[in-house]
Image (spheres, coloured by chain):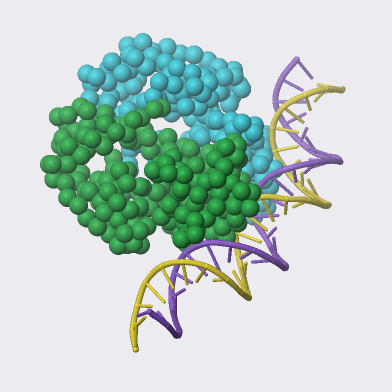
Chain colours: A green, B cyan, C yellow, D purple
Amino acid sequence: MTVDPSPGIASIAIHAKFGASEASYLKESRIFREGEPAHHIYQVIRGAVRSYRVRSCGRRQILAFHLPDDIFGLEFGPNYRFTTDAVVDTTVRLVKRHSLEYVAKTDLRVTSDLRSRLAKELTEAEAHLLSLGQRTALERVVAFLLEMDKRMAPTGTIGLPMSRRDIGDYLGLQLETVSRALSDLRDQGVLRFSETSRRQIVLQNRERLLELSI
Amino acid sequence: MTVDPSPGIASIAIHAKFGASEASYLKESRIFREGEPAHHIYQVIRGAVRSYRVRSCGRRQILAFHLPDDIFGLEFGPNYRFTTDAVVDTTVRLVKRHSLEYVAKTDLRVTSDLRSRLAKELTEAEAHLLSLGQRTALERVVAFLLEMDKRMAPTGTIGLPMSRRDIGDYLGLQLETVSRALSDLRDQGVLRFSETSRRQIVLQNRERLLELSI
DNA sequence: CGCCACCTTGACTCAGGTCAACTATTGTGG
DNA sequence: CCACAATAGTTGACCTGAGTCAAGGTGGCG
């Protein structure tokens, strides 16, 4: 399944005229909660967002991180399926759902774009599922770094917006395990932490990283 | 997200006139392979089907089991995303993809039904993901039993068509772990195995099973 | 009736979780 | 701008749940 995201973003951007606005959220603040009526569709402009569910025992599973240009909060049922909040200070564009649905009725490009986005979400969920079902802790962290590297500007440095705990809750691991995996990769010479922050990761041997993801 | 499956099945059944046929597959035989051109959409009539991917290291992740009335092989990209085979002797109905797509162009009910099915697949993948990320072995087996019970005729007995290994590959566990979890539940008095087969599971305390799934 | 695949159970190992101590970084108020 | 508190991350020691390996059962099928 190859879905080029560009035309979709373009069409949502164009039709955003019909009632788009912007909103900013402080780090760690709530955007919407699971179960609330899904009145808006969002697109990240700056920052990062996490979508998650919390089990009754208190454990949290992050389903996805949303980075600039990503769409989130797109629902086909009446309510949001996840709780969503800003990982860092974040600005989003938001469109009223009914206005997007109105546009979709007349513009087939938008309809088909929405379907592509749904298909893309499904593909991503399946890849994530494979990771959780089959990979070791190290393999999961490696896959995560490769995913982030691919999604962010390819400067060779990955500026992770999220904490070790966030990464753990995405990968089904404890934060200590994530930290150990990263230290391990550093000791192997695969990466190093930048001087400024341990969330800035410099890839030093992408070949080796790719091997580890097999 | 509440998706009533009935109208969808109805519409696919109706439009099946446009070129549906039936096919039967022996137990353990291949239906299609990941990466092949997705020329058909299938619906289980009798039997059971598994969709899976195999990692290069040889480990297999089963993404879904398909039971009677379930649709599978519905793709939006050009190729199948999974390998699929019959778990037991299975009969399917199959429709040529291009004829279904032709119908979908003129009949909005079919279009909307296809979208609902995609949304349903996404919801299921997300539930599965939660299971793999957050649950213990026992909790996963409990969730699996409840899922199977819900999907099969509610007679109080679950006739599992698949082996312990299949269940393990679905839940991200080894077959021995699945077996131990089932023995544990039996020892707790939550279930018992039927006299005829260890794949026939009689629920004796559904309350307790539900508690364990929290 | 006997083979073979499936399942169960036991013994042991090990990856990752848990708990705890410590270091580094960020944020805050004087 | 500094002092200090709070937060984030690392590392070590130990524990445990699930994996691995192995030895029987058991039931279906030729």
Query: Percent x, y for residue B43?
Result: 43, 23
Q: In this view, does B157 lie to the left or right of A151?
A: right
- Front residue of B8/A22: it is A22
**Picture layout, residue A57 above or below residue B77:** below
Report the residue at 49% width, 22% height from top: B35
Q: Is residue A202 left or right of residue B110?
A: right
- Front residue of D6/B61: it is D6
Q: In which quarter of the image is residue B41?
A: top left
- Front residue of B104/A29: it is A29
Total marks drawn? 0
Q: In this view, does B193 lie to the left or right of B63?
A: right
**Picture layout, residue B163 above or below residue A168:** above
Query: Percent x, y for residue B6?
Result: 34, 31
Query: Percent x, y for residue A214?
Result: 59, 36
Report the residue at 52% width, 42% height from top: A143
Please, which residue is most extreme toward the left here? A18
- Front residue of A108/B205: it is A108
Report the residue at 33% width, 13% height from top: B99
One can see residue A86 in this view: yes
Query: Percent x, y for residue A189?
Result: 61, 48
One can see residue B132 in this view: no
Q: Is residue B112 left or right of residue B5?
A: left
Report the residue at 32% width, 28% height from top: B114
In the rendered image, which quarter contains the N terminus of chain A? Answer: top left
